[in-house]
Each structure stands twice: as structure tokens, then as C-alpha cells.
Image (spheres, grey):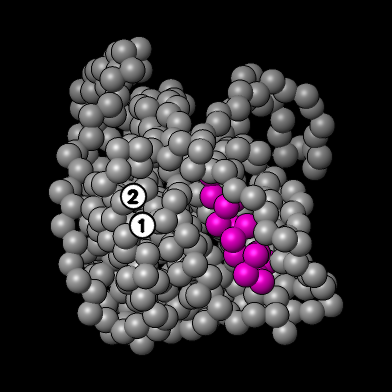
Amino acid sequence: MARRKRRRIAAAVSGIALLIATGAAGAQSPADPAPVSEVYSGPRHIPDDLLVRNAAALAAQASAPEWKRAATVPADWAYSLGEGVSTRQVSFYVDGGTRLQGKLFLPKDFDARASYPAVVVGHGINALAIGVEKYAAKFADRGLVAMAIDYQSYGFSDSGADELFLLEADATTDADPVTLRRMPVRIKRTNLNNVEEVKAFRAAISYLQGEPGVDPERIGVWATSNGGAVTSALIGVDGRVRAAVIHVMGTAPATARALDLTGPALDDAIVRANAGQGAETTAGFSFQTNVDLWYRTRNRDVAPGTMLQRVRDTTAVLFLPAERDELIGGNRSAIAGSAYLTSRGTPSQVITFPGLTHFQPYSGAGFEAGSTLAVDWFKKFLGGRE
């Protein structure tokens, strides 16, 4: 038995080492679902006639060659601040130690003695806060406090405990209550870890709740793409969120259950447990980097679909999917998630970007419509300056 186990480990180490060397690990993924969208028939808490008024511009964006997107591009990130909107870079901490970075956007004539609703703004998979700051700027221009954040190991944020590796043995013991020693470390960046991203949102909410002028009882979250999936889990954990906007993402309800670890994922887990480093794979759209293949296993632990049953009826959830989304297969998962929340008494709605694909709503007519609808949602469920 022991010999068979050792042979299995050796074979797994050899096989995954080859994958690392060739860069082939995780290069292939299951085919993306064909976009199939449905007509939303649930409650309408905010009007969606904005899409009708901008139908021509949205149709042009959907069909014009210059608007075709396989990822966002730097031109999609550009924005200008509205009159009187101010910003400042801030630091906040998760788990009492890892420093994260955010950019705070304050509305015109901001008064720290007043009371404002505030929104955390989060980016998608292998992306940066600078790509979604334009949403925070738009929210501040409409009277909200907003903070765009970089997740742990992204952008300006630091790496955390699971991304710092000692390069020599730790000889310290509990014999001394405090030991000060300099040791070399290796830092891993762009670690895809939805578990850590949930924690980043929670730390950002705590930071905003302590910010002068912010009403701690009126906190919202806006997040896009994979960040939207993370938000579906977040609102099932953190009841402080009073309003959420999930942009170009949908989360269908799912049954909570333990998941198996088999095949290549198990082989990789064995290697990681024995050697400290498993296979790597490329990931990302707006920019690509090598990341641990383990992220696919780790991120299943978040299980956002199973978390919908825990969302409070005090958390209003707006889904903004794209009709021709090639990554999540249209708007059906958003409609299923919204219907489930509505059936449980949670205010929810789906407004679909007509004709657009996953990466088109970040700019042009899609951005103007989506950011305006998001503000309308926050205004309805968070209110304004008091």
C-alpha cells in the first residue's frame, strides 16, 4: 500500500512538472456555453426604459466592428471626474495584517458631518481596480461615496499569507514569545482566490463604515464578472450589504454539498501537499498571467449559488447581464438567481444589456446605461445624502 502511494505521488509530481515546464496545464477549458437569453418577467423595482431610449446606440455598439471585444482594453478604462468629485488613495487591512489598497471617490461638496451611502467597487478575474474606477467616479458624481479596490495580490494591494513563501527553514519555536529575524521570502502575485476576495470585500465594508461622513447602515457593493460571482457569496455571508449590483454575471441557485477532488485536480493537490507548489496555468482576459492551477479547486469552495439561500431580505440585488454573454451563456443564470431571491422575499431584478457580449458593457452606450441603472438601484435602496 505504501509503495503504491509513493509511486502515485512520484507519477503525479513527474506529470505536473512536465505540465509546468510546457505551460500546458489548464490551457484548455470546457467550451463556453452558447449564449441563450430569456425575457425577464419578475418585479421591476427600478424602471428599465433607459434601454429603450438608448436602443439605437446599444444596437450600434453590439454590431460595429470597433466595439468587438475579447477583453477590455485600456481605452475602456478611461474616465474623467465629474465637477467637484475628489479622490484619495487609501489603505485598509484584511485579516489584521495584509494591506489592501482602494481609491476613494467623494461627491461634490462632500461634508464629513453629513451622512452618505457608500459603495465598494470590485473588479473581475485577473483585472485591476483601474479598469472599474470609472464606475466609482460615476457613483460619486451622483452623490454616493464609492471606493474601488484591488484584491489581495492585485494592483497596488499587497500579497497575503498564502502568497508569501519562506526560502529557508523557520527555526523559531514557542520557547520565546517574540522572535525578530530577517528571512528571505518569495512573493507570488495575481493569485486567483475567491475566498480571499470575499474577505477583501468584507474588510472594505468595515473600512467604509468607519469613514467620516459614511452612514454605516447604508453600504452597497458593485462588482463585475467573476467579482459578481464573489459578491453572490458575499451577500450570503455579510448582512451589512444593503444593496448589490452584479454586473455581467449571473448566479443560479445551487444545492449545498461536499465536492469531490479527483483526477488531475487530486494529482495537483498531492503535489502541492508534498512539494509546496503545483501546476500553473494562464488566466485572465484584459491581461494574462500564470496562476496556480489550484485556483480552480479553491474557488469552488466559495460556492456562490449555494449562498443565495442565506441572503437577507434587507439586501436588494440587481443583476445586469449581457444578452449575448459568451462566458456565462446569456442571462439565464441571472434570471434564475433573481427569481430564487424574489421567492424568498429579497428584492431583486434583472436588466439585460440587449445584444451585448461580456466585455462590451464596460464602455460606450453599455457603460452609460449600466452605470446609470446601478446608481438608480443604489439610490432606491440606499438613499442619498442626509
Contact flag, marks 2 and 1 (Cβ < 8 Å): yes
Residue at disc 2, secondary structure: helix
Number of marks in picture: 2
Residue 144 magenta-highlighted: yes
Quarter holding residue 337? bottom left
Q: Position of residue 108 (x, y in %)?
A: 75, 67
Q: Where is residue 291 in the image (x, y as percent from the top left)?
A: 43, 30
Asked if residue 164 can be seen in this view, the reply is: yes
Q: Where is residue 269 in the image (x, y as percent from the top left)?
A: 34, 34
Pointer 1: what residue?
Answer: 57
- Give the residue at the far front of this rendering: 56
Packing grade of label 1 (10 A; few <14, some 14-19, many >=20) is: some
Q: In which quarter of the image is the C terminus?
A: bottom right
Q: Give the range drawn in magenta.
A: 131-145
Up-down relation of residue 209 to residue 368 (above or below) = below
Q: In which quarter of the image is the N terminus?
A: top left
Packing grade of label 2 (10 A; few <14, some 14-19, many >=20) is: many
> Residue at position x 23%, y 74% from top?
40
> Residue at position x 37%, y 27% from top?
282
> Residue at position x 80%, y 42% from top?
177
Up-down relation of residue 109 to residue 45 (above or below) = above
> Residue at position x 60%, y 38% from top?
155
* Main secondary structure along the magenta-highlighted residues: helix
Pointer 2: what residue?
Answer: 61
Q: Where is residue 376 in the image (x, y as percent from the top left)?
A: 50, 75
Identify the amino acid type marked 2.
Gln
| 180 vs 218, nearest the viewer | 218
Residue 83 magenta-highlighted: no
154 displayed left or right of 228 = right
